[in-house]
Image (cartoon, grey):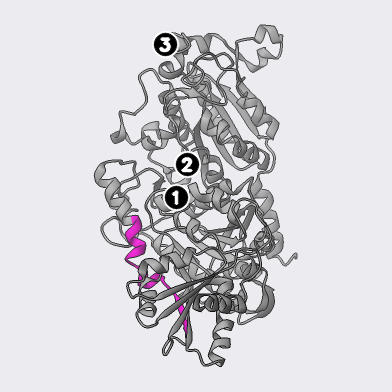
Amino acid sequence: MPVGNNVQFIEGNVAVVHGAIAAGARFYAGYPISPSSEIAESSAKELPKHGGMYVQMEDEISSIAALLGASVAGKKAYTATSGPGFSLMQENIGLGVMSEIPVVIINVQRCGPSTAAATKPAQGDIMQARWGTHGDHGIIALSPSSAQDCYDLIVTAFNLSEKYRVPTIFLMDEIIGHLRESVTLREIKPSEIINRKQPEKGISQQELKTYCYDGNLPGPMPPFGDPNFLSRTTGSTHNEKGEFCVTPEYIHKSTLFLTEKIEKNCEDITITRSYNLDNAEVAFISFGCSARSSLDAMEMLRSRGVKVGLLQLITIWPMPEKQIRDVLSRVKTIVVPEMNLGQLAGEIRKLNDYGCDIIQANRVDGVLISPQDILNAMEVRSL
Amino acid sequence: MKTYKDYMLFNKLPHTWCAGCSDGIVLQAIPDVFAELGWDKHTIALVSGIGCFGRVDDFLDINCMHVTHGRAIPTATGIALANPDLHVVVTMGDGDGTTIGGNHLIHAARRNINLTAIIANNYIYGQTGGQYSGTTPLGSITATSPYGHVEPGFDICGLAAAAGASYVARAVPGNPRQLRKLIKEGFLTKGFALIEVMVDCPIQYGRMNKQGDAYAMLKHKLDVSVPVEKAKLMTEEELEGMIITGCFVNKPRTDYYTEYKKIIDKLSLGGA
């Protein structure tokens, strides 16, 4: 682990590995895929130096399966992939959701569907991150927009995953993954790390409930191999002890719980960044690499006297509804730059009870959306 | 002195398997061997997939993880690598272990992950109503091969042996003593061990293929079983229709964790 502050000129795909290790991750299982492969390579190099383990599996299905197993045995585990591999992982992401197993999945987004332009950037997996696996559930997804973010926010991703016992998606994109910037590998203090809850002292095996459906926080999760507690997990609907239990009562309350433990903790989970929103008449809402272009577009317009601000979403899921509504209620025009055909814009329209004009600025040709692209989208609309 | 009862959840019985199913014979054999080895239940992790035999975990009072169809072995891989002190057992059927999950089986064997896979092979997808699997024999009548099956089935032991498993064995449920011996040898193998058990499914497979009732199926498999040592002296024609039982491979080699740990130890000593 880096001691003190250590500045390196590295790409996002490498910064994220340093961050994961600083967060306490000690297990990686994955299958190489562009544009995420540097994360596998860097993990293979760095993890054993910290007593951690790297294993390259036969596919992405087995990769996430191995993560779930390692997590149940007590390790913080992560993998990295891109669109096609992320699709293969979806069934077992559902297993992680249902069994409430913390793992972190890094998706360095590229064009799709299928192979499309495999090495080119896109942001088309917003909906796959939310609804890729079947059934109602909550999920957490964060999106970094710099190499520094990759280091800092992967720590947050692990913390949220552990706290809420849910697979957490780290939605990068090819631009941020391969962007080399100065990154401060700051020391992460133990007080900044959240570990999954353990059984309270003095509790017996009979009293132990590893699943709780009453409140909005998950139960304790002792690891397999704990000398005092046995535990069990299952992808089937289960009772508080993790035992198979498919009564209508349990199906109902577990489905609600898995959704509400995320939705009702929205304020704790959602992170946004605001730029010049106080006096804005026009607001950009964006994320990831598109947020960088949005920042430039904002500066260009402000130099021309247009009152423009930016709401950058770090948390993509759950959608930062409160922060988005706050912006919608104060501006006249919203511009949503993103490298897909409007996946985020659609979510913002759902919240638009305020009559805002919502303009999409999209680019899906595998080329980074530029500040000028955003300005063009606004001009076309105003013609 | 421990007995199998120390590892059972009796409040979960009766089990959900059909009358005449031999999965229960294998279920009891597993904790019997735990008891014989005197294992602390906290040190055992069992991973099961989806299918009739994937329900084994419901009845066992040990650490259990019930996962998705076909993915028990890679999940167990994560457990075995995360905590090398755990005894990792994987229970699957022929669908889970060698059809949807076949790729994971061969790679775990090749990697030599320290776990014991117990595959209950009943030639059929029992839980979903009797459709053919990757081990269903040529000509079998099943719900999805109503005119006779046109594919041959996998030889699970041959597959595992070719993929590099450290230990490979086959048993029939009519010989519970041998079954326990082979499971025990598998458990004591440091590396990938596989035990195939030729369980009977009188309801979904036997009935369609006129194999008689549960007793007839159990007895038939016992009658046609040939110890591996004897089979070596027999011709291919003589072995037609026979089930070769016993240990095929017992060649331990360094498992993945042990090999990788050497790298960790070297690096922690400042080796790179």
Question: Looking at the image, can residue B234 be seen?
Answer: no
Find numbered disc 1 in the image and state the secondary structure of the residue it sits on: helix
Q: Would you say the residues marked 2 and 1 are in contact, meaning their CB atoms lie under 8 Å apart?
A: yes
Tell whether A49 sits left or right of A68: right
Q: Which residue is mark 3?
A: B215
Label 3, label 1: how far apart the Cα atoms are: 41 Å
Which of discs 2 and 1 lies nearer the camera? The answer is: 1
Tell whether A348 sits left or right of B108: left
The subunit letter for the residue under badge 2 reads B
Residue A94 has which mark? 1
- At label 1, the amino acid type is Gly
Label 2, label 3: how far apart the Cα atoms are: 32 Å
The residue at 61%/79% (across/down) is A372
Residue B68 has which mark? 2
Residue B264 has which mark? none
Q: Earlier in the sequence, mark 2 or mark 3?
A: 2
User: In the figure, B33 relative to A278: above or below?
Assistant: above
